Each structure stands twice: as structure tokens, then as C-alpha cells.
Image (spheres, rainbow, N blue to C red):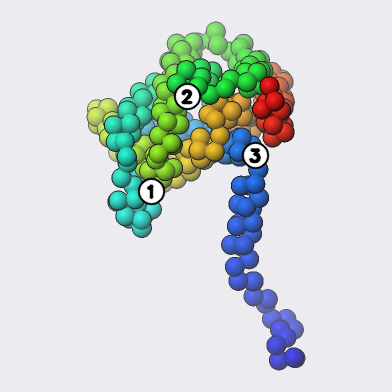
Amino acid sequence: MTAALTPPGAPRRPRRGALQRRIALTGHRLRRLDPTVQGLLWSAASGAVFSVLNALMRGLAMQLDPFQAQFLRYLFGLLVLVPLVWRSGLAAYRPRNIGGQFLRGGFHTLGLLLWFAALPKIPLADMTAIGFTGPIFIMIGAYIFFKEPMRWERWLASGIGFVGVLIVVGPKLGGSGGFYNLVMLASAPMFAASFLLTKGLTRYESTGVILVWQALTVTLFSLPLALLNWQALTPLQWAGFLLCGMLGSAGHYCLTRSFHVADISATQSVKFLDLVWATLIGWAVFADRPSSSTLIGGAVICAATLWIAARESRGHSKLD
């Protein structure tokens, strides 16, 4: 028995497979949650990832032509996915509805053109808050096209969250950036159409297929405008776009997973947490001290999000 003991002072070898077992256990526990709660968690994760991505993209778009930045962000997002496609084979990523993939890519590209045009001109928190009009368009579209039930809890949580947004950005909308605020606002219905198409595609396409074809179609549609004012990049900018590609693919994966497991309208209230993420990033990275209106609005947003998550997890809405 003594021969099997570890000698004193010798480093202990890590247990084989401990990390894999922990990951599998975590995944099992997540799958046992109510589908709507799973959707809320995936949606919250996507918002946190996109908030980091938006901060990086704003810095890059201020250094380069915004449309070149848009093209490179999705080009690197596509390159990040190439190893996955290579491992599984092209047949695994052949879409069943290629027209739907290109239509979705077209709407998303149009939304991005407006979004990137305004991105360098307005603060990150304002950009995030204006984007919160998107859930309103999404819920209306989900009701019209997918006949999803619009329970009063979902409307109320989204309405309260939107009030929180107005508390944060209301005093700022009349400033010099008013025109670009409107441009940013115009991107919201385009993104809503893209996400509604994504929800439709999840009925018969896998998350991986949707992710790859979004990167491919947006890259192709964005290339012509990117070539008009092309600028040479520094090594640091190339590295920044590589990181953006990784973050973008991760964010869209989380978002698409949320559409797979829950009604798209049920996941929209948690998107108001994006403003909290944007405020925290601004404080931690850029030393931007949040105003009192931001703190009050953030508290309102968090309260609405926690309330709807609790309601959905208990299944109270199913009794109405």
C-alpha cells in the first residue's frame, strides 16, 4: 500500500476528466431548468458578450472607415468558424433554405450599415439604450408572424425596462448627436426583422448552420462598401478584429441558442441588462463614472428582469 502513496513534497496530479465532468454536470443542471429560463440565461450571456464586442468595435470604427470595420468584423467571424466547418465537413453546414439565409443576411447587413454609421458618433451607453427599442419590434413581429402568446408579464417587464432606458438617456437625446441617434434608431427594426427570420430558421436549421451563413452572407454584402475607402491596418488592429470575430461568433451562438429553447418574445426583457453591461465596461475600462440617472435606470431594468425571470420559472404565465 505504501508504494501507491504519493511521496512527500511531490506535486499532486490533477484528476483526469475532472473538468469535463464538471462541465457536463453544469450542462445537465442547465438543461433541467425551465426552457424560458434557459432562454433568458442564453440571452443575458449574449448581451454581455456583445457589450464587450461593441466597445471594441467602437474603438476600431473611430480609427477606420465604419463600413470597412463592419466587413472585417464579419470576415474574421467567418474565419473563426472555418475550423468547425472543416472538422464536420461542408455537408453538415448545407442549409435547407438558402434563400432564407440570404434574406436574413440582407436585413442584418442593412441594420449594420445604419448601426456602424452612427457608432463612432454617439456614446456607447446611448447606443445600447437606443437599441432597446428592438425588443418592441420583435415582440410585435413574433405576435404577427409566429402567433406567440403575448402574456401581460412580458409586456409589463419590457415596458418597465424601457422606462429604465428613458431614465438613462432621456436627457441626452436632444444633444448635438440627435441625427445619429435617429440613424441608430432606424437600425432597430432591421435587426428585429433579422432576429425574427433567425427564429423561423431555427425550426429546421441548426445553430451552427445559421451562425456560419450569417457570417458568410453579411461578409459578402458588406464587401462593396468596404472597398470604397479601404485603409491599411496595423498589427494591433488586425488582432482587434480577430478578437471581435471570436466575440461576435460567441455572442450570436448564445443568441441563437436562446431562440432555440424559448419563445423569442420571452427572451426580450433580459436584453435591458445590456445597458448595465455597457455602463460597467465604460466604468472599468474607460473610467467613465455613471451618472445618477444611469444608476436609477439600471436598478429599474434589473428589477424588471429579475421579476419576469421569477414569473416565467414558476410558470405563472401558463395559468393565465
Q: Residue furthest top?
A: 174
Helix, strand or loop status at disc 3: loop
User: In the rendered image of this protein, does residue 116 appear above or below residue 205?
Assistant: above
Front label number (3 vs 1): 3
**Label 1 belongs to which residue?**
81
At x 45% / y 21%, what residue is drawn?
145
Helix, strand or loop status at disc 2: loop
For the residue carrying disc 2, how many other residues have a C-alpha within 10 Å: few (<14), some (14-19), or many (20+)? Answer: some
As drawn, the label of residue 146 is 2
> Where's residue 52, x and y in %?
53, 37
As drawn, the label of residue 34 is 3
In the rendered image, the quadrant that contains the C terminus is: top right
User: In the rendered image of this protein, does residue 86 appear above or below residue 241?
Assistant: below
Q: In the image, is 291 to the left or to the right of 148?
A: right
Mark 3 or mark 1: whose residue is earlier in sequence: 3
| Visible residue check, residue 297 | yes
For the residue carrying disc 1, how many other residues have a C-alpha within 10 Å: few (<14), some (14-19), or many (20+)? Answer: some
> Where's residue 78, x and y in %?
35, 44
User: In the rendered image of this protein, does residue 19 appear above or below residue 8?
Assistant: above
Q: CA distance from mark 1 to mark 2?
A: 30 Å
As drawn, the label of residue 35 is none
> Where's residue 139, x and y in %?
53, 20
> Where's residue 159, x and y in %?
63, 16
Q: CA distance from mark 3 to mark 1?
A: 30 Å
Q: CA distance from mark 3 to mark 2?
A: 21 Å
